[in-house]
Image: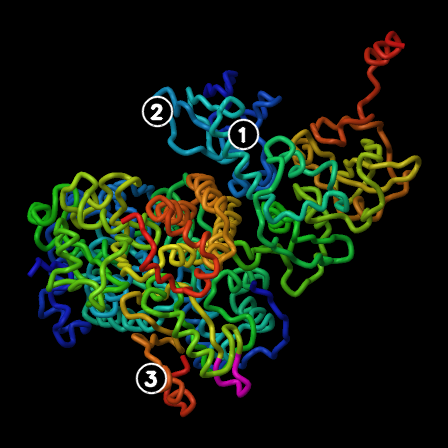
Amino acid sequence: MIKTVITQQDRPVLSPEKMAEIQGVIQQFPEGKSKSAILRILHIVEREAGGWLSPDTMDMVAEILSIEPIEVYEVATFYTMFNLNPVGKYVLEVCQTGPCMLVGSDQTIEYIEKTLDIKVGETTADGMFTLKTSECLGACGYGPLLKCGIHYHEHLTNDSIDTLLTACRNGEVEKY
Amino acid sequence: MVKVTIDGIEIEVEEGTTILNAARMIGGNVVPPAMCYYSSLEGSGGNCRTCLVEIAEGSTRDPRPMPKLMVSCSTQVQDGMVVKNKTSQRVHENRGAVTEFLLINHPLDCPVCDQAGECHLQDLSFDHGGAGSRFEEEKRTFEPIDIGNKIKLHMNRCILCYRCVKVAEQLTEKRVHGVLHRGEHAEISTYIQKAVESDFSGNMIDVCPVGALTDRTFRFKSRVWFLKPMNATRECKKCPGHATVWMFGEEIYRVTGRKDAYGEIERLDGKTAWICDDCRFETKDPKQWNIEGPRKINRHSVISQNHYEIPNPLKTNVKKSLK
Amino acid sequence: MGRKLLLEHIDVPGIETFDVWRKHGGYLSVEKALKNMSPDDVVNEVKNSGLRGRGGAGFPTGMKWSFLAKPEGVPRYLLCNADESEPGTFKDRYLMEKLPHLLIEGMIVSSYALGANLSYIYIRGEYMWILEILEKAIAEAYAKGFLGKNILGSGFDLDLRVAPGGGAYICGEETALIESLEGKRGNPRMKPPFPAVKGLWGCPTVVNNVESLATVVPIINMGADEYVKIGTEKSAGTKLISACGNLVRPGVYEIEMGISVEEFIYGDEWCRGIANNKQIKALIPGGSSVPILPAHLITKLATGEDRLMSYESLSEGGFATGSMLGSGGFIVFDEDQSVVRNTWNFARFYAHESCGQCSPCREGTGWMQRVLHRIVNGQGNMRDIDLLADINKKIEGNTICPLGDAAAWPVAAAIRHFREEFEWYVNHPEEALKRNYGMLKNTPTTV
């Protein structure tokens, strides 16, 4: 059950470069259709805000697009990529849908849970990892796999998971 | 004009009319139930699927039957179309199925629900519901919340008809209220429980087909069937002041818009006579209203079973002669 | 080797760059179409090729194009559906990642045919790195004069953009995709009006799958007459199949329509058989929403003839003994896999992905998921099996969009072909719990 815990958080400060990027996204759509840019802007802003969208951050997006805040909440809560609660530095999303299950995604999830001592949906005490499950990521032939940042890590084995976790801890993995 | 036959009754309607509205022109029991469609709210309909009908013949030009049942609220009639509603076994079965779907997560808390007696879901389950439930799982639950100090939201009872969202979109200046999350987690909410403050927000209560949005100024005051609905008017700067006041003795317990047989607010001079929140929530002194007389409720639900009809001299005679 | 029309140059180093792509015959179709053909010529060529939509529904692409309304002064849009999310399907990802210019080329030709001057690729948000690949390739195409104003001096202008989704399977449904591209929740629209009349921002719109648009390139290059010689009579050309599950060599393959299923699963050129020397138990040939086939109906039809990889042969026998080609998501189950558990998994997927707009899907998918979850966890009873069959009958056909059907069919087919396995779960609750991954070796199946 998705239940939204409302925690206020100051809105992220966007650098002039990020603001320019956002304006560029808006310009990809005809005049008067700026609302179409919302998903991409939410992706950008979420990264800037530490990986999740607080109501305050969403209000900021509403201001950028000159729409009502509820229009942003409606969209942000519909699409599952957006985190509505604080997350760890790295979010590990393991695909758990059929084809991945056939090649062992259940065991992958179990292994990560055991290794990090957290359950799905939880964040490690050091704030480093959040473990999530995800429905079909569209890499069915290369499972089991997880998404970390914008990249997929495929053909997972216990060893390759260990390697990935260590690399994350050492800051060698792109966060986004 | 195009000709359409619904359950064997032929009617001529204007081109572009939906099957549901054509059926409403005929009236009586050929009218499919509608839980989400609301004629004065643009873009409503299509969600609940209770108004599904069978199209036995598409049109004179192409008389092939349509393979799937169609939603009558959004399907336009074609010349020569033959529609089956009451007379279709498939419609009967599928309407029963939709009713079951709407009820599996519904709390069935009618005894403590202010909507009881005027609830469209009660009517629907009376007509199409099963005797028992096949749903053995845990129901989806939400805590009731106040959205502003006049409206209560019981998400548990909501059937996600989207009518209130359309009201917020089309009647109020600033929408703070919408549908969040998705699938079975979808909920009507204001997210950070922002108060709904607008002159016309109370109409969300009037359009709600179930007890999800109720009037906090009337909460637990009385069962609706103990009240006497009276047509009343008043001078109001914000709205036409064209309402129904619900009285108990000399007191006004609540104020609503004037609803027709399908639960829709009546039109006045071609416009829907939505009432403002001042009339609804703040005007409960009978002196403030010009009370015209008892209102006839022509719904088939429990509130129409009592004594609301305008006294009919013929009927009185019958009673007398029986004595 | 089978004939390759799309993936011919996939292994060429640097094929994702404009120059290498151009060197291997890239953008010839744009030259041919813009210089020597009228837009209607292109539409007719695609119509004559018999190309069927590669996204799953298999609707003829040329016919879809010919429905596009063309009112004066109203812009028209071509949208590429790259929201690939059907479990078992990962072909579009492969194609876009490796051959971004093939898609761009297909979109230029198709936009020209439809008279669209602004086109979008709507890509699922999870494929964010592919979005970057596409944008890089698009920038190259602009720089080389294949996008922008007056392409190749033809007077045809085209702007091409990429827009990401945010994680929603339903946005692969064309009207949900349009809603999403308008910046709204991905709730499918009611039809009519169809997008060809009222689509993006109320304008006439065509939505095509990545592979369909890519296939326009070889069709224009070789001509429809040559194209129809490939494949079978009703399934022209080649098709990308994304093979996954318990195979020796899963992956994306381009097949000529009409090769046998047996050859595809066991052939050296293709999947090379079942992994770990196991037997095949079941197959879902076209993505999670098509009916599952039990072992005896995989390589042979009910009539005993060979089953082929084509629209018509895979659906031979209807829902009783057939399935569908769908999106080409080819999911293979070995003998140790539990069909019941997988059915629950897919039911959970559909419940998770239902938009929640209409009641049969919103309530029905969640209900099925819960009942199946109970059965899998040893809490089921016999009447649950009939209940499931009944619920899916009541969802099917009663919803706004096809997600309801997509959720219902796999459950119906699993019960039809593997009822004994469902009953085993009910009769052996403790064992079902212990053997949670469905090791059903010693129990009879319907095979």
Dots 3 and 1 on the same chain: no
The residue most toward the front is: C442
Q: Nearer the viewer, residue C322 or B171?
A: C322
Q: CA distance from mark 2 to mark 3?
A: 62 Å
Q: Which mark is residue B64?
A: 2
Query: Residue at the location (29% across, 62% down)?
Result: C160
Query: Residue at the location (12% across, 52% down)?
Result: C259
Foreground mark, 2 or 3, reads: 3
Q: Which residue is mark 1?
A: B20
Q: Is residue C251 visible?
A: no
For disc 3, the chain is: A
Question: Which amino acid type is marked by label 1?
Answer: Leu
Local SS, label 1 = helix
Query: In x, y percent, where is residue B78?
Result: 42, 25
Give neighbour class at mark 1: few <14, some 14-19, many 20+ (Cα, 10 Å).
many
Local SS, label 2 = loop
Q: Which residues are magenta?
A: A123-129
Query: In x, y percent, where is residue C192?
Result: 41, 39
Foreground mark, 3 or 1, reads: 3
Dividing the image into 4 quarters, which one contains the N terminus of chain C? bottom left
Q: Is residue A113 above or below residue C40?
A: below
Query: Residue at the location (47% across, 78% down)?
Result: A113
Query: In x, y percent, where is residue C400?
Result: 45, 43
Query: In x, y percent, where is residue B187?
Result: 60, 55
The residue most toward the bottom is: A170
Question: Which amino acid type is marked by label 2?
Answer: Arg
Q: Which residue is mark 3?
A: A159
Q: Nearer the viewer, residue C188 or C407?
A: C407
For disc 1, the chain is: B
| Residue C21 drawn in magenta | no
Q: CA distance from mark 3 to mark 1?
A: 62 Å
